[in-house]
């Protein structure tokens, strides 16, 4: 077999082990972009393959169905987002500081890779339209609630929440704020405006919900160097 013929066989057949991880990463990134832009039903293997730079047949070596591919994209996005969040909050002790760091990381994630927000904002509606996605995403979709529940539990234990504000209501509010800002970022596609809105939100929350003292709003300057070093 000539060298050129061997190259063709490699491209059309199962990828070698040394190429497998890189190909899978490109495949998931391409699928995330297509699902976010076109939705689950309208996304085709041909679209994904073109962006990933592979053949449509090669997709099946990694994922036997589009449902399994969607589930893998969702799992990867969740793992990435919450590893970033966990890293960010480890530097802080109070809910104010922790949630502020989560907001800053969200701005950075959306700025660096808008396809992540584009995918995430449509998950709920995609699950409603496509029941086959419900079972493959159900456990992971509870991850946000569990993460915020732990933050609010710690805040309640430390007497950080103003009297009359329940832990459950605060958790739901923080969840709604994160989801709303995520959707806002996809609509405006402007990281500076997104960051400025986050700074105003910090001011509102600290003055109205938490027991911390006066807070002065500052111009958005992006996440700190330690938050960027992830």
Image (spheres, rainbow, N blue to C red):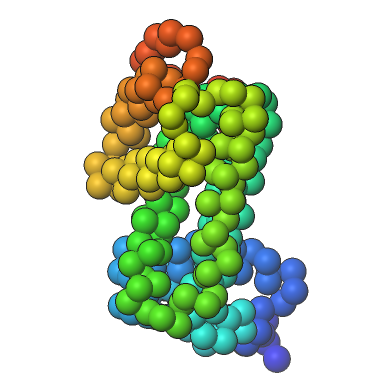
At horizontal 51% and vertical 26% (from top left) the residue drawn is 161
Quarter of the image where one finds residue 111: top left
Quadrant in which the C terminus is drawn: top right
Q: Is residue 62 left or right of residue 199?
A: right
Residue 32 seen in the current view: yes
Residue 150 vertical placement versus 59 (above, below): above
Which residue is rendered at x = 40% and y = 51% of the image?
117
In the picture shown, does residue 10 fall above or below 35? below
Percent across and percent down for residue 36 are 36, 62
Give the side of residue 17 with respect to residue 111, left or right: right
**Figure check: 161 above or below 23:** above
Q: Residue at x 39, y 17 (%)?
A: 207
Q: Quadrant of residue 182?
A: top left
Residue nearer the viewer, 188 or 54: 188
Q: 81 or 214, which lies in front?
A: 214
Nearer to us in this view, 81 or 228: 81
**Residue 205 higher or lower than 149, as above or below:** above
Name the quadrant of the N terminus: bottom right
Percent x, y of residue 131: 41, 81
Residue at the far left: name it: 188
């Amino acid at each position: 077999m000539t060298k050129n013929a061997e190259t063709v066989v490699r491209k059309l057949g199962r990828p070698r082990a040394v190429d497998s991880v890189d190909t899978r990463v490109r495949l998931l990134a391409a699928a995330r972009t297509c699902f976010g832009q076109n939705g689950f039903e309208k996304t085709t293997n041909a679209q994904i393959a073109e962006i990933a730079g592979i053949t449509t047949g090669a997709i099946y070596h990694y994922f036997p169905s589009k449902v399994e591919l969607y589930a893998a994209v969702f799992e990867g996005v969740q793992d990435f987002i919450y590893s970033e969040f966990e890293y960010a909050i480890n530097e802080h002790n109070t809910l104010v500081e922790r949630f502020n760091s989560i907001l800053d990381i969200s701005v950075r994630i959306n700025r660096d890779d808008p396809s992540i927000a584009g995918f995430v904002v449509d998950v709920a509606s995609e699950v409603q339209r496509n029941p086959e996605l419900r079972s493959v995403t159900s456990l992971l979709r509870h991850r946000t609630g569990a993460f915020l529940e732990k933050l609010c539990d710690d805040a309640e234990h430390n007497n950080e929440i103003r009297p009359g504000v329940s832990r459950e209501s605060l958790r739901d509010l923080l969840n709604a704020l994160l989801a709303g800002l995520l959707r806002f970022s996809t609509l405006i596609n402007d990281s500076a405006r997104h960051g400025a809105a986050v700074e105003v939100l910090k001011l509102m929350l600290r003055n109205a919900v938490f027991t911390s003292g006066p807070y002065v709003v500052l111009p958005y300057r992006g996440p700190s160097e330690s938050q960027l070093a992830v």
